[in-house]
Image (cartoon, rainbow, N blue to C red):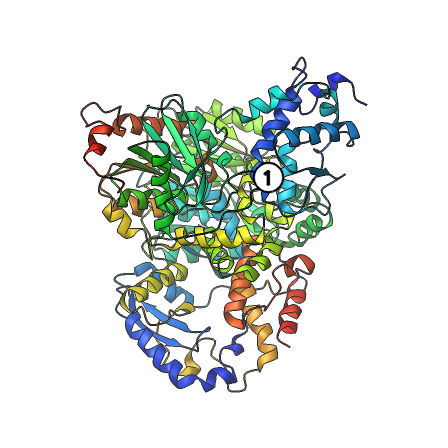
Amino acid sequence: MSEPGAAATGRGGGPGAPPDTALRELAAALRDTSSLICSLPGPVRVAPGPGTAPWTAAAGDVLDRLTGRLGLPGIEVVPDTAGLWAAEVAVGRRLALDASALAGAADAPLAGPVRAAYAGPPGEPVVLPAYDGTPLRAYAAGEPGRPAVLVVGACGMPVGLAAPWLRALSGTYRVLTWESRALFAPRAKAGLPPLLGYGLAEQSSDLLAILDGFGVAEAHVMGVCGGAPLALAAAAASPRIASLSLWHGDFELGGDAPKTDHQRDVAALLAKAGQGLPQAEGLYRLLRHPRSLAKLRPDVAHHLVHPYASPELLRRYGLLNGAIMTTDCRPLLAAVDRPVLVVTSPEDTTAHPDGSVHAARLLRRAALRWLPHGDHLTAFDAGPEPVRLAEEFLRAHTPGHAPDRPTARDRFGDRKGRS
Amino acid sequence: MTAPTHGVTDTARAARPADAATGDAVARALATHPAVAATTVRGPSGRRTAYVVPDPRHAPQLHRAAVAGAAALPAGLEWHEPADELRLAGVNRTESAFLYREIVTDRAYLRHGIALPDDAVIVDVGANIGMFTLHAARPRPRARVLAVEPVAELAAATAANAALYGLDVTVLACALGAVPGRAELTYYPGNSVMSGRYADAGEDLEVLRGYLLTGEGGGAGGQLDRLAAGRMAAERRGCAVRTLTEVAAEAGLDRIDLLKIDVEKAEADVLAGIDETLWARVRQIVLEVHDLDGRLARIVGQLRDRGFTVAHDQDPRLRLTPCHHVYGRRPDAHPAPRDPAPAGSPLVTARALGERLREHLARCAPDLPAPDRFVLVTEVPEEEEDVPGAASPTASRASSSRTAVFTEIWTEIFGPGSDRPDADFFDLGGDSLTAVRLLTLLEDRLGEEALAPDAVFTDGTFAGLAAAVEASGR
C-alpha cells in the first residue's frame, strides 16, 4: 500500500498537490479517450504507466468507480503491454495509470473530478440532427452571441484533437465544432448510427446543420487538414460562410499539385477500406498492430487511431475520408469569393504544402501565409503563432469585428432558409 | 535490380491485340500533354507502361533526367526520388530520404538566421551526395558551389546531381584537413553519412543506435542491433588531404557566403586549415560538431573570438548522440533575402510526371485506362524487344512470375538491392502505411488475397513474404 504522498510522484502532480489531483487527471484522460474506449470491440485492456508500482486491487477499485461515473465500459488492467493492440496501447499511454497515486486518492470524492472532466472546452457534446437525420455530436465554447467560428477538423478525429482551438478562441468567439458523421456513437453504449451518405456534399452540409443547431446565422469556418475541403464545399454552397481559413489543407487538385507519399498511401488505404467489410477487416488486422503507433505523436495517438478502432469504423472512414481526399477541389476553389486565409508550412510532410499554394492561387480572395515551422499535426495544436495569425484574420474579416461590413443578421436576413 | 522477365506472360500475350490498340490510344492522348515529346504505351492491363520522352522545352529538367538516366551512372549509384520535386543520384534510398528530411525538410543548415543571397558562394565540405548543394543552389541559378567529398562514389553522385540540374558546382574528391597530405578514411556503404577519417566502428555504432532509438520507428533489442550492425559494414579507403585555404585560392573564391562543414569528427581539422585571410572572407559558417572532449564549447568560443555571432542546437532525434549544429554569422553581414518560396510544382521526377499525365488522361480521355507506370526514356522504343524490361518469349510462367511481381514491387518501394532474402520489411523503413502500399500494389497485379494483410508481422523478411505471395497463388 502506498503512502498518500506517493501521489505526488506519478499521476497526481507535485508535492502538496490536492489529494484528488490524480483523480482529476485520470478523469480528464478517460474523457479524452472515451470515444476510443467506447469504439473498441471487446473489453479494453491497458497496462499501467511505465516505471509505476504494480497494479493493486485498491487502484482497480478507484478506476472502476471512475469509469462507472463517466458512463464508460470497464477497463481491464494487465501487467504490461505485451499482447495489446495499438489502440489499447494508445489509451494506456494517455491514462498513464499509477497505482500508488490512485490508491493515495482512494478516499477522495469523485464528484469534483468528474465535474471537472466534463467542463469544457470541449465539454459535453450536444447531439444535433444532420439534414438527413444522422445524429452529430457537436460542441460549443464561448459565449453565445459572439462572432462565430466553426472549426472543421480532420475526418474521423475525436473532438480532443480540435480542442486546443476551442480553448484558444473561445475567450473572444463562439467556437463550434462537431465530429464526423456516423463515426461516433451519439451517446455512450448507443452504437454507431447508420451511414446514410458519405459524399463531400453530405459531409459539408453537416457544417450548415451545426450552424442551424446552434442558431448561428453566419460564421468564419476554419478547416484544418481534411476539414479544409469540407469548409470549401460549404462555402461554395452557402453564403452563410462569411470567411474561411484553411490550415495545412489536404486538397485533391488533380495533377496540378504534388502529393506526399503519405497522402498517396492514405488514399490507397481508404480506397481499399471503403470497398467493403472484408477488405476493412483485413486492413484492421494490419493496422491494429502496435507497430502502427511508431510514427504517431504519442500525445495525440489516442485520437489519431480512432477511425481504425474496429473494422466497421475503418470501412466507414474509408468512404467518408476517401470522398474528402478524392473529390476535386478545383471547382470549389473557383466558386468561393469570400476572404480566405490559407496557411501551410514547408515542414508539412503529411499534406504537401504545394497543395495549399495552388489552392491559394485558385481562390479569388486568398492570402497565403507560410508558418516557418510546423508539421501537419501542429496545425491542431493552436500554438501562439497560428493563434495570432487566426485572430488577426478574424479581426479583419469576422462579422462583429469589421464595422464597415453588414452585420451577420443583415446579411443573412435577406435569405430564405438555408442555402 | 528488378526482374524484367515478368513483363509479358502467356496470358498477357493472348490479350495483346486489344492491349496494343488501347496502348496506342493512350499514347495518342498522352502525347497531347506539353511535357511529352513522344511516348509509347506497352503491356497489358495491370502492367501497362508508358515510355515517355520528356519535351526539352516544356520539361527541361525531366528531359535532362531522362538523358542522365539513359547514361550509365557510376558504379554504386542509382536514381532516387525522395520527393516529388527532387530526383537525384544516391547510394541508397534510405539515406537519400534521411538527407532530404534533414537538409530540405528540417533545414538543418539554414537556421538561426543563416541565409543566402542569390549569387551565393558556398563551400560544402562533406557534401555526401550533394543534397545540401542542390538545396542551396537549385533556387539560386547564380550561386556557385565548391563541394568537397573524399568518398569517390559520393563525389560522383554530387557531380551527377549538379549536372542534372545544370548548377555551377565544382566537385573536389578529397578530404580537407589542417595540412596537405594523404589519409585513410572509413567508408560505410550502408551508412555513408557517418564515413570519415575518424570513424570508429564501436563509437559510431553507439551514435547510430542513439539515433535509431530516438528516431521514427526506433525499436529496441535484437532488431535494433541487427539494423545498426547491418549499416556499419566498413571499407578502408585512401584519400588526398588538402587545406581549405589551398582549395579556396585555387578556385579563386574572394568571399564565402556560407561555409558548411559536416565531416564526422574531422571538423576541427578543417577549421585548422583556414588561414587568417580566408577567415576574414567567411561571412557565415554552419557545422556539425561532435561534442567529444568539450569540442562544442571550444569551437563556439573560437568562432566568437573570430567575430561571429554564434548559436547552436541539437536535433531532438540526435539527443542521444554527441552531434550538434553550430551556426555563425558575421554581425555586420547584410541581411540576405529570404529563401525563395517553395516552387509551385516543379516537374523533375517520373513520379510527378506520372501524376500529371494521369490527370491529363482523365481530363481529355476519361474512358481510357491510365498506365500503371511511367518510365522516362530518350527515344521511344520501336519494337517490343526494345522496351526496357520487355519479356523474352520464354518468360517464366505463373508461379515464378508471382515472385517476380513481388520482387518488382518490393524494390520499387525499398530500392534496388533490397531484395535480399533476409531483408526485413521494418528494418528497411516500412511501416503500416507502407504495408498498405505493398498490399495494394500486389493486389492490383496479382488479385485479391495475394498476401495476408498482417503477413509483415508474422515473417516480414523478403524471403518470407515472397514465399507467402507464391503460396497464395496455388
Mark 1 element type: loop
Q: Residues within 10 Å of mark 1 (few under 14, many from 20)?
A: many
Looking at the picture, how far across and down is residue B304, in whole percent?
Answer: 48, 23
Left or right: residue A393 versus residue B448 is left
Name the residue at the top extreme: A16
Q: Residue at x 21, y 32 (%)?
A: A413
Q: Residue at x 52, y 75 (%)?
A: B4
Tell me where residue A26 sits by quadrant.
top right
- B382 relative to B211, above or below: below
Quadrant housing the C terminus of chain A:
top left
- B432 relative to B369, above or below: above
* Chain under callout 1: B
Looking at the picture, how far across and down is residue A326, in whole percent?
Answer: 39, 55
Dot 1 amino acid type: Lys
Left or right: residue B26 versus residue B416 is left
Looking at the picture, how far across and down is residue A247, in whole percent?
Answer: 38, 38
From where the camera sits, is residue B196 visible? no
Q: Residue at x 57, y 29 (%)?
A: B296
- B371 relative to A244, above or below: below
Quadrant housing the N terminus of chain A:
top right
Q: How many marks?
A: 1
Pointer 1 residue? B265
Near-viewer residue (B194 or B376): B376
From where the camera sits, is residue B386 visible? yes
Near-viewer residue (A190 or A366): A190
